[in-house]
Amino acid sequence: MTRFIYLLICMLGFAKPIHAQSYRLAEFQGISMESMRYFTLLANATLSPMDKAVLTTPMSPERMMLETSKPNGLSQFMIWSCSLNTMALIGLKRIDIPLDRGMSGYWVLAANKARQADLAKVNSIAQLKNWRLSTGFPQNNPNPLFGELQLSYAPTVQHALEMTAKGRLDGVLLQARMAESLRTRLPVGVELDQRLMISRHTALCFYVQQSELKLIDKLQNGLDRIIKNGIALRLSEQEGLTQAIKSLALDKRQNITTQATPNWNGDASRKKYPGWLLNVGQQ
């Protein structure tokens, strides 16, 4: 509708037409379809009415970073943890505005049924260090969320769950939104823990090739605008981004907070955008 109104204004001669621009948004291989759809909707709302975010083919983290960091790469911007500061070393600028309300910081555990009694005794990250766990993300994924744990390799979340069902893993760490979508589809022999929530004070941000000055400006200003005018919140609710809080009873779980997140100040974002970042079980 916004694009239609703008085109009508241009046809009537009240505004100069702006050429439509497509921007390539990297798709992370292994991310859920629901999450990618939400991020695409958010990116399109952030850009100007005549612009469009177009998804690339799915790429590994390494390929995604390589293609985004080089001029004329397959992608022009990507989504990653706000806590990763090394992106600047490969020519990427972080748009330091959280995209996902901080939902990427909340995790639960799907464990082998045979380990449920042992899991009931776990009350800290240290007590999970001897567990054979995976996130289902690539082994060399540089996401620092679980630096305290020695994670096992599994190419995808589904592979990790199947390995857990066969006893080759003790459990799989699942981001809350993914756990919510999988909780009725877990393999036989795997149960979703109902007691613990593992939290890390983080969120997701856009990363852009440093030479893409126009795109950087559009994303910074656009995100600021749609968070303040309520469009971002409406999309978050429309896409069920926070549904996991209720369905998984995250507020009622025992919270295990991992080590402090480096390089990203969530308190500054909360001050600038009151109510945007969630505060589920934080200590």
Image: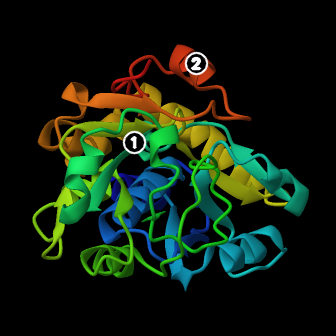
Residue kind at label 1, given as amino acid type = Met
Q: Residues within 10 Å of mark 2 (few under 14, many from 20)?
A: few
Could you tell me which secondary element the residue under label 2 belongs to?
A: helix
Position of 170 relative to 83 (above/below): below
Q: State the image coordinates of residue 106 (x, y, percent, origin top left).
A: 39, 41
The C terminus, quarter of image: top left
Q: Earlier in the sequence, mark 2 or mark 1?
A: 1
Q: Is residue 36 above or below residue 14?
A: below
Whether residue 155 is visible here, answered yes or no, is yes
Give whichever of 79, 181 is nearer the camera: 181
Q: Residues within 10 Å of mark 1 (few under 14, many from 20)?
A: many
Residue located 53% across and 35% down the image:
258
Residue 200 percent location from the top left of the image: 51, 36
Query: Circle 1 — which element?
Result: helix
Q: Which residue is drawn at the image coordinates 45% and 71% (left, top)?
A: 136
In this rendered view, identify the residue nearer to me: 31 or 236.
31
x, y percent for residue 117: 21, 49
- Rendered residue at 61%/73% (across/down): 139
Q: Position of residue 133 (x, y in %)?
A: 45, 62
Asked which quadrant contains residue 160, the reply is: bottom left
Dot 2 amino acid type:
Asp
Left or right of 193? Residue 263 is right
| Residue of label 2 | 267
Q: Quadrant of residue 165?
A: bottom left
| Dot 2 and dot 1 residues touching (CB under 8 Å) | no
Q: Which residue is mark 1?
A: 103
Q: Nearer the viewer, residue 122 or 72?
A: 122
Q: Which residue is rendered at x = 21% and y = 53% of the image?
A: 116
Frontmost residue, 110 versus 7: 110
Position of 6 with respect to 262 (left or right) is left
Q: Quadrant of residue 217?
A: top right
